[in-house]
């Protein structure tokens, strides 16, 4: 900072003020100082600033997958919502493993983030304790946990599964299956499956046509193999819900290899409203959870919460919209 001040011909205090937003300083002086800082490659020491203000200027966030379009949309929504408040995002990838989430959270909390966003409501006991004791805003997303840590922005995955079961039933399908991943790791996918199974029973249908593909996330080739196994065991299956649109696309490809006409011979539905579902042939029926909106709502909760102490905050549970997007892959029921 002294080097920048010397080059710009000002005091170090003036440099400090110029490189922070919201300070009263002339534009001409600010431009001169910024130019000097750029020439020297100087970046203000955020750690020292954090000691002085008690704020670090970043929000920690964990997501299960870095190659999932839904979670990418949520991250984008959070980033967009925090940008105007000069808050940065520190991202951790759990690979659907709550033990890994615990490790990441412990490391992140050591850097004193101003707030924490986690995906889902399933955590280890120690992770719950770490987050509950931290003393900063905590937001759980993509779920409606029975025992929230603090704030929640999410939806019922169970209800999403029930919604798709109702749609397939209403279209006339009766021999309905589900393709998903490991229910122990993908707790949200497991909730969708449970809701789907429960609704089939309520509708008077069998709910035993369940194929677990592999460890989450279920990829296209794994879902294709699961579809092969499904048809081998239950060749009369007339509809299947997949845990995600990627899995649904894999199942669709496998259906073609079997010589099926979709949806005449078998209907295929997914979850997540990925781009791939809109450009498949036929287009794949899916459930849109408004992933980016979840991120924006989480960012909004953090902005609101940072303005008050934890003791003064009221727990916010914000349930987001879930819509079924009906497309050609399920729209024409077969004759029974």
Image (cartoon, rainbow, N blue to C red):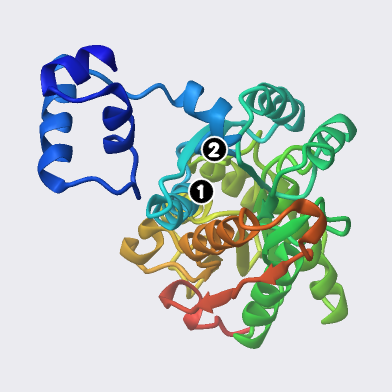
**Would residue 299 be visible to someone looking at this image?**
yes
In the picture, the quarter occupied by the C terminus is: bottom right
Question: In screen coordinates, is 278 left or right of 90?
Answer: left
In the picture, the quarter occupied by the N terminus is: top left
How far across and how far down the image is residue 334, in percent? 55, 81
Tag of residue 200: none
Of pointers 1 and 2, the one earlier in the residue sequence: 2
Tell me the crowding category of disc 2: few under 14, some 14 to 19, or many 20 or more residues within 10 angstroms, Cα based. some
How far across and how far down the image is residue 58, in percent? 51, 37
Question: In screen coordinates, is 72 left or right of 103?
Answer: left
- Judge whether 142 appears above or below 118 on screen: below
Tag 1 residue: 71
Q: Are marks 1 and 2 in contact (CB under 8 Å)?
A: yes
Q: Residue at x 82, y 82 (%)?
A: 203
Tell me the crowding category of disc 1: few under 14, some 14 to 19, or many 20 or more residues within 10 angstroms, Cα based. many
**SS state under label 2:** loop
Q: CA distance from mark 1 to mark 2?
A: 7 Å
**Would residue 190 be visible to someone looking at this image?**
no
State the residue in front, 113 or 27: 27
Q: Residue at x 54, y 37 (%)?
A: 65
Q: Residue at x 80, y 73 (%)?
A: 200
Question: In screen coordinates, is 66 left or right of 172?
Answer: left
How far across and how far down the image is residue 237, in percent? 65, 64
In the figure, residue 297 lies in which quadrant? bottom right
Find the residue positioned furthest to the top. 3
State the residue in front, 166 or 49: 49
Tag of residue 65: 2
- Judge whether 213 appears above or below 335 on screen: above
């Amino acid at each position: 900072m002294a080097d920048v001040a010397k080059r710009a011909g000002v005091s170090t205090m003036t440099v400090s003020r110029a490189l922070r937003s919201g300070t009263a300083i002339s534009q001409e002086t600010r431009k001169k100082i910024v130019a000097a800082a750029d020439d020297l490659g100087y970046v203000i020491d955020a750690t020292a600033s954090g000691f002085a203000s008690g704020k670090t200027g970043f929000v920690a966030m964990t997501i299960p997958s870095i190659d999932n379009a839904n979670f990418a949309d949520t991250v984008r929504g959070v980033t967009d919502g925090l940008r105007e408040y000069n808050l940065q995002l520190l991202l951790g990838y759990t690979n659907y493993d709550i033990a890994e989430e615990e490790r990441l959270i412990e490391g992140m909390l050591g850097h004193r983030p101003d707030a924490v966003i986690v995906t889902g409501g399933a955590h280890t006991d120690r992770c719950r304790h770490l987050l509950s004791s931290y003393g900063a805003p905590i937001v759980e997303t993509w779920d409606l946990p029975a025992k929230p840590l603090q704030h929640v922005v999410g939806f019922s995955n169970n209800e999403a599964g029930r919604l798709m079961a109702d749609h397939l039933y209403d279209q006339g399908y009766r021999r309905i299956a589900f393709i998903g991943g490991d229910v122990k790791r993908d707790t949200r996918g497991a909730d969708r499956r449970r809701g789907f199974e429960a609704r089939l029973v309520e509708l008077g249908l069998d709910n035993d046509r369940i194929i677990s593909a592999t460890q989450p996330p279920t990829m296209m080739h794994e879902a294709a193999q699961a579809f092969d196994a499904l048809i081998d065991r239950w060749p009369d299956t007339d509809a299947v819900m997949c845990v995600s649109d990627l899995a649904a696309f894999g199942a669709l490809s496998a259906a073609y290899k079997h010589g099926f006409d979709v949806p005449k011979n078998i209907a295929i539905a997914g979850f997540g409203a990925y781009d791939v579902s809109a450009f498949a042939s036929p287009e794949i029926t899916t459930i849109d959870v408004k992933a980016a909106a979840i991120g924006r709502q989480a960012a909004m909760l953090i902005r609101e919460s940072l303005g008050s102490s934890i003791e003064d905050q009221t727990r916010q549970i914000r349930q987001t919209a879930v819509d079924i997007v009906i497309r050609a892959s399920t729209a024409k029921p077969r004759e029974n």
